Amino acid sequence: METTPIVRAAIIGCGGMARWHIRSMLQQSDTTRISVLCEPAEQSLTQAEQLFREAGIPVPPNQPDLHRLLRDHAGELDAAFIVTPHAYHHDQAKACLEAGLDVLLEKPMVMNAAEAQSLISARDRTGRTLVVAFPGSLSPQINIARRLLRSGNLGSLLSISATVWQEWGPGTAGTWRQQPELSGGGFLFDTGAHMLNTVAD
């Protein structure tokens, strides 16, 4: 029986969302191995390392400098999962693609259209895979709705209305998510990006 090779991944950023993903990835050790971390903040790193200990899995090394990580570890990696503030996405993803890694990039992709085009060009040039983490695009319900709308069986699409409710303001108070220079624009660049992606699908 043929086995699927284990994907050796670097986690770039170990903040709250990254730790949510790490918990899930540690339960999928038959398909994924977190080989190295990249986190400069001691508190975030300590919290991420604790997840490995709780799972009984050796804590991978941390290299807080992405360029050193890529220099020293790229040959031992297949992919990078970038879970950092939005302002860093472009440069980090581009560096990982150019180092020969596939990239899973937390949403939103980047801060503006020029950065998006730059990453698409880097993906095309390197031949690596670049995926933005929009789970709605994989939703069976969204896929059924898309097929129905595109088939024309429901008639012409006249408008789309979308609503999302979240206590985003209080929940992100005092964090980088409310700093436009890092987040790109508040709620719309955060949870709102999922809604816009679903509408675009």
Image: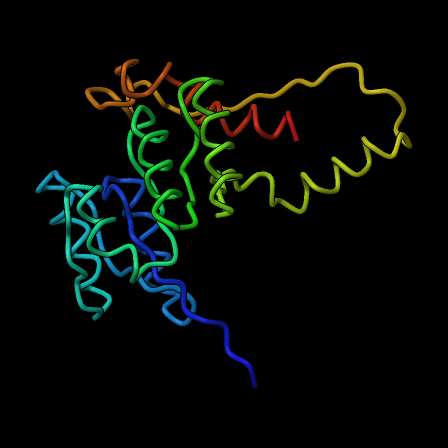
- Give the answer, above or below, for where 46 lies relative to 166: below
Q: Residue at x 43, y 32 (%)?
A: 107
Is 70 on the left or on the right of 145, as rendered? left
Q: Residue furthest bottom?
A: 1
**At x 48% / y 23%, what residue is drawn?**
192
Which of these two is toward me, 121 or 80? 121
Q: Give me the residue at 43% from left, 49% from top.
A: 102
**Which of the 4 quarters of the picture holds residue 119?**
top left
With respect to residue 114, does 82 lie above or below?
below
Toward the viewer: 127 or 169? Answer: 127
Query: Which residue occupies 66% across, 31% down?
Result: 201
- Expressed as whole percent of the image width and height from the top left, the position of residue 56 reads 21, 70
Q: Is residue 58 left or right of residue 9?
A: left
Residue at the extreme front: 125
Instruction: From the top left corner, tell me how far across and down residue 74 is, in percent.
Output: 29, 54
Q: What is the tally of numbered marks visible in this picture?
A: 0
Residue 9: x %, y % from top left: 33, 56
Horizontal side of 154 relative to 12 (left or right) equals right
Question: In the displayed structure, would residue 168 be above or below residue 49?
Answer: above
Against 23, is 104 above or below? above
Tell me how the rendering is colored. rainbow
Quadrant (top left/top right/bottom left/bottom right) for the N terminus: bottom right
Residue 134 horizontal/vertical position (percent)? 51, 38
On the picture, is 146 further left or further right than 14? right
Nearest the eye: 20 or 58: 58
In front: 44, or 81?
81
